[in-house]
Amino acid sequence: MLRVSNLSYKYKSGPQILKNVSFELEGGVCMGVLGNNGAGKSTMLKCLNRILHAKSGEVWLDDKMLLNLPQREIAKKVAFVSQSVPSTQMTVHDMVMLGRRPYMSWGFSEQDHKIAHECMEKLCIEHLRGRYLNELSGGERQKVMLARALAQQPKLLLLDEPTSSLDIKNQYQVLEIVRDFCDNLGITAMAVLHDINLALRFCDKLLLLKDGKATGYGGRDILDRETLKDVYDVSAEIRDVQHCKLLVVD
């Protein structure tokens, strides 16, 4: 279980970005983090794996106080996929192997290679292992970064706008893969999303942020007309369409 209590963050010489955010998340659950630009969504993810150091608050993962652990130990429990996917002259194999760095002593072991190859197989990219990232499409590179994250064998997967540069087909493929991680591997996932319909389709829980504060947390039913107006300043509602919930703007 992930338990976040009163998480706050303030940039130096800047405004407070996060203001006492609290929630709990069971293992194997996928949560969508929603809100307008500047609401603190990406900052919160970076605080959870200590890319940024929270001003105050606690983050517990199972029985471990996450923010007190050495960075190497955090990397064994938490994997982060940023919204900017690198397009570099590094092979797919080498990029995925970077996910094994927290477990290295003197070098990569046979077990490290085995895990990396299994992760590439899970994402159906093993045939790309000798290709350079700058030769791949955006969707392929996003799958490579997910494979690298999976190679860390994390309990918590943090995704910062994982679909922002993808076409519709790849948006669905990537989130279906994340959903599969949660269902079959027991990984807890948190994804910052701007597309509410994607969140409704793939996420079990939703966290709404506005001006650094958590204004709603729960299932899909928290997205009522009043909440949508408050968070996004649009007149809209969620409707059932062929047993699926979809956002409809007035």
Image (cartoon, rainbow, N blue to C red):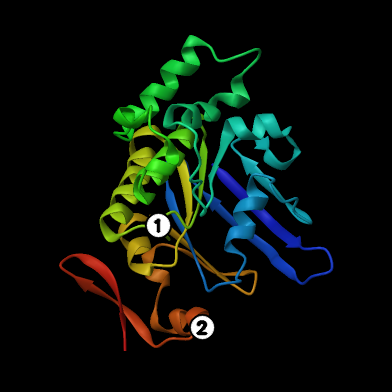
- Does residue 65 appear to the left or right of 94 in the view shown? right
Image point 68% across, 30% down: which residue?
A: 72
In the foreground, 103 or 4: 103
**Would residue 153 be visible to someone looking at this image?**
no
**Quadrant (top left/top right/bottom left/bottom right) for the C terminus:** bottom left
185 over 116 or under it: above or below: below
Q: Quadrant of residue 121?
A: top left
Image point 42% across, 16% down: which residue?
A: 114
Q: Secondary structure at mark 1?
A: loop
Q: Secondary structure at mark 2?
A: helix
**Residue identified by numbered label 2:** 230
Q: Quadrant of residue 28?
A: top left
Q: Position of residue 144 (x, y in %)?
A: 41, 38
In the foreground, 182 or 145: 145
- Does residue 131 appear to the left or right of 217 in the view shown? left
- Does residue 119 appear to the left or right of 96 in the view shown? left
120 over 104 or under it: above or below: below
- Label disc, if present, on residue 163 of the rendered structure: 1
**Would residue 62 be visible to someone looking at this image?**
yes
Image point 44% across, 43% down: which residue?
A: 134
Structural distance between the alpha carbons of marks 1 and 2: 25 Å
**Quadrant (top left/top right/bottom left/bottom right) for the N terminus:** top right
Q: Position of residue 71 (x, y in %)?
A: 70, 34
- Label disc, if present, on residue 148 of the rendered structure: none
